[in-house]
Amino acid sequence: MEGSQNSNIGLKVGLGILLVLFLGTAFYASKLYSDKQETERTLVTEKQQVMNDLNNMAKQYDAAIAENEIANDDLIEARERIQGLMDSLKISQNSVNSLWRYKKKFLALQEEMDELLVENDRLKVENELLATSLDSTQVQLEERTMFTDSLLVQNTELANVVEDAAALQAVGLKGMGVIERSSGKQIPTERARRSDKIKLCFTVAKNTLTEAGDKELYVQVIDPKNNVLGSNDQIQFDDQVLNYSLISRFNYENKNLNICEYISVGEEKFEKGRYTVNVFNEKELISASEFELK
């Protein structure tokens, strides 16, 4: 009888141990399945985020390509690489290693895009400068023709005309934002937040009637909020007060002289919008231009 009771007790203990082991195994399997499901959801979410980032990058390239009248092969090739990566990502496995490889490729493409867009901005500015220079040359030719005709007709006013003709003239006035590298290299940009300085360039035109020597012109830069940038000093001519950004000083030798000046705002950023640039010879406005920072 006693042996039978011991046998029953041993059986119950064995069954208890098996039950505990079964419940533990079931809990562990459930935990593994839950963790796997959570990992799958996270990978799907992150994969979609990478796909969204690639889509946004592709749109930026599409916009840059559309702005160029002449096809930029570098931009087109970069856009095709992004499309290839997107197509590959769509059919890729949802694994940590696979997703990490695509993230690394995305970061490399992002760095490449930043460089290409800066270069694209530089080329756009150069093309605009060339077009402006051609337009300015045409305007100068038309003005010279009109001036010559006026001299032939108005001989009685010759003295006044000669005096006016002797005044300095600034042509080809152009303003732009520039990124300034530590090496001193400057890269033109239309983006306000990336501009370190505003670059202002113009040409003091050749005029044999003007006396050679040290000269100065007053440059005024007005931002989108109607503030005069730079030193914002004042000078008075008779009854007229002029607020100027800087004084451009140079030695004039009766020939075309290219001049570039710079405006910075210290630690602040430039405002987005349209900027106005004026150049004065004393109180006389001799050149004006506008440009926009986005």
Image (cartoon, helix red, strand yellow):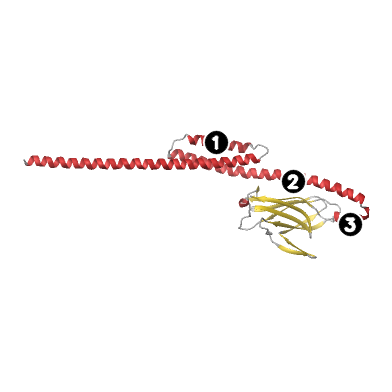
**Could you tell me the amino acid type at mark 2?**
Thr
For the residues labelled 1 and 3, say whether their Cβ atoms are less than 8 Å apart: no
CB under 8 Å between discs 3 and 2: no
Residue bearing mark 3: 160
Q: Earlier in the sequence, mark 1 or mark 3?
A: 1
Q: Residues within 10 Å of mark 3 (few under 14, many from 20)?
A: few
Direction left: furthest residue: 1
Cα distance in 3D space between marks 1 and 3: 67 Å
Residue located 41% across and 41% down the image: 41
262 on left or right of 29:
right
Amino acid type of disc 3? Asn
Q: CA distance from mark 3 to mark 2?
A: 31 Å
Q: Which of the 4 image quarters holds residue 12?
A: top left
Alpha-carbon neighbours of circle 1 within 10 Å: few (<14), some, or many (≥20)? Answer: some
Disc 1 and disc 2: Cα gap in Å?
37 Å
Residue beneath label 1, please?
83
Determine which residue is flagged by label 2.
132
Q: Is residue 85 above or below residue 182?
A: above
Q: For this rendering, which residue is in front, 209 or 225?
A: 225
The residue under the point 55% across, 37% down is: 82
The picture places residue 180, in percent across and down from the top left corner, at: 64, 51
Q: Quadrant of residue 277?
A: bottom right
21 and 179: which one is in front?
21
N-terminal of the pair, mark 1 or mark 2, is: 1
Seen as rendered, the residue at the extreme right is: 156
The answer to whether any part of residue 136 appears in the image is yes
User: Element under label 1?
Assistant: helix
Looking at the rendered structure, the number of numbered marks drawn on it comes to 3
Is 173 drawn above or below residue 63 in the view shown?
below
